[in-house]
Amino acid sequence: MHRISDRLKKKQPVFSFEFFPPKNDDGERLLMQTIEDLKALEPDFVSVTYGAGGSTRAKTREWVRSIQDRYAIPAMAHLTCVGSGREEIRSILEDLYSDGIRNIMALRGDPPKGETAFVAPADGFRYANELISFIRSTGLDFCLGAAAYPEVHGEAPSAAEDLRNLKRKVDAGADFLVTQLFFDNEKYFSFVDQVRAAGIEVPVVPGIMPITAFKQIERFTAMAGCAIPDSLVKSLAGVQDDAEALLNLSLEFTLRQCEELLSKGAPGIHFYTLNQSRATAIILDRLRRSVSAERR
């Protein structure tokens, strides 16, 4: 059962991890250890990002193939519109398919480093829905994920237009959605209500990232455009000089966040790990024990 869409049809929650391709040997050793630490938690799938401007394309392929072959964990490769025309995209797809990869997260992607605006390459794609349509046209039987933004994409002129764009991605062939990270569950629940009202019926998997250092707060807000509740910021500020206390407080917040999401119908949790295992392992272990206890 390598297709993520098949796993999302199961009644139990789906748990997954996101990694990024390391830039050096130390980073590779860290990621290998992280995967070793997390494999015991038996994730339903993992994803590997593509890097700004497609900068880690070859590494993405290497890592998804390695993870899937070595650990028998379904792996999803991120693929963006950045820097590649149609025939290059076709070649990438054929390579992934020949490697046994059956899951792709299809994204427009961020501009290359040093550039502020996205410019579609010649004979390329401007939007994720165009990429999704092209993948479907190849006849290669991929399961396709797409990104969703509970707090609206930073470039969208309005929430309504962002929702219309999301529907275009699903209409083009996306099988499921994974959200940008968020810290206020009401944003997710409200978003899912809007998604369903728009006629979008595919699963919407919440993306979650625990805060492990106080300096991450400003970065998350700036990069991801997500609001962090004032109560959480104040609590973390009170222990910002005590790393262990901050981590414990953050873990408790994230655990409660995940428990509420699952209890109110979320199909699973996708953890943005930043290639670190400790926080994710603690949360998922506690979460699974909590879910098991509720079912007894």
Image (cartoon, rainbow, N blue to C red):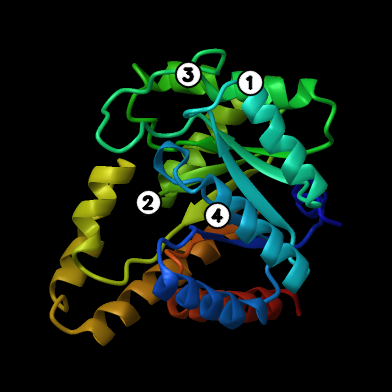
The image quarter containing residue 53 is: top left
- Residue type of the residue flagged with mark 4: Lys
Residue topped by disc 1? 86
Mark 4–mark 1 distance (CA, rounded to whole Å): 20 Å
Residue topped by disc 4? 59
Secondary structure at numbered mark 2:
loop
Mark 2–mark 4 distance (CA, rounded to whole Å): 33 Å
Mark 3–mark 1 distance (CA, rounded to whole Å): 9 Å
Which residue corresponds to the image point at 61% horizontal and 18% vertical from the top-left?
130
Placement of 56 over or under 93, stated as above or below:
below
Secondary structure at numbered mark 1:
helix
Mark 1 or mark 2, which has the lower sequence index? 1
Q: Quadrant of the N terminus?
A: bottom right
Image mark for residue 121 = 3
Q: CB under 8 Å between callouts 2 and 4?
A: no
Residue topped by disc 2? 184
Mark 3–mark 4 distance (CA, rounded to whole Å): 21 Å
Q: Nearer the viewer, mark 1 or mark 2?
A: 1
Question: Is 236 or 196 nearer to us in this picture?
Answer: 236
Where is residue 125? Give x, y as percent.
55, 18
Mark 3 or mark 1, which has the lower sequence index? 1
Mark 3–mark 2 distance (CA, rounded to whole Å): 36 Å
Packing grade of label 2 (10 A; few <14, some 14-19, many >=20) is some
